[in-house]
Image (spheres, rainbow, N blue to C red):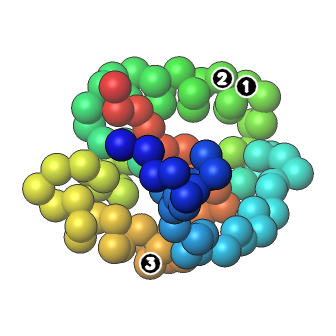
Amino acid sequence: MPNPGNDGHYEVLWPRSPRQVQLQPLAKRLDTLEGKTIAQMWDYVFRGDEVFALLEEGLKARYPNIRWVSYKEIGNTHGGEEREVVASIARKFKALKVDAAISGMGC
């Protein structure tokens, strides 16, 4: 039932909270993949073995000195050991001198 003293205006609340996390600058992008080490990360859900093989072939033709770290070295980024695998990524990337990563391919 309308309140005759509100002049048609109602008090409301904004449904979203204030932003909790401030925006961070993006990481610097690589100028080229030539001579770089690229890690593959896969959740073992959808044909990553096929996709990564095609990526390796195509990028090797364009960047002959590219080096790959297989998804097999990184581990399954989804499933029973997901927490341990994800927690170890930074350490593995540093040890393997990884410059960039390709992560895929859940469906």
Between the residue at mark 1 and the residue at mark 2, the CA separation in whole angstroms equals: 5 Å
Q: Nearer the viewer, residue 103 or 94?
A: 103
Question: For the residue labelled by badge 2, is the local secondary structure a helix, a strand or a loop?
Answer: helix
Q: Nearer the viewer, residue 71 or 65?
A: 71
21 w.r.t. 80: above or below: below
Q: Is residue 65 left or right of residue 12?
A: right
Q: Is residue 49 left or right of residue 98?
A: left
73 w.r.t. 84: above or below: above
* Circle 1 residues within 10 Å: few <14, some 14–19, many ≥20: few
Give the label on residue 91, or none.
3
- The residue lying at 34 percent from left, 65 percent from top is 86
Between the residue at mark 2 and the residue at mark 3, the CA separation in whole angstroms equals: 28 Å
Residue 18 at x, y percent in the picture? 58, 71
Residue bearing mark 2:
58
Marks 2/3 in contact by CB < 8 Å: the verdict is: no
**Reading the chain from its start, which is encountered first: label 3 or label 1?**
1
Q: Nearer the viewer, residue 76 or 106?
A: 106
Residue bearing mark 1:
61
Residue 43 at x, y percent in the picture? 30, 42
Q: Is residue 101 left or right of residue 77?
A: right
Question: For the residue labelled by badge 1, is the local secondary structure a helix, a strand or a loop?
Answer: helix
- The residue lying at 57 percent from left, 27 percent from top is 55
Question: For the residue labelled by badge 3, is the local secondary structure a helix, a strand or a loop?
Answer: helix
Q: Hey, what amino acid is under mark 2? A: Gly
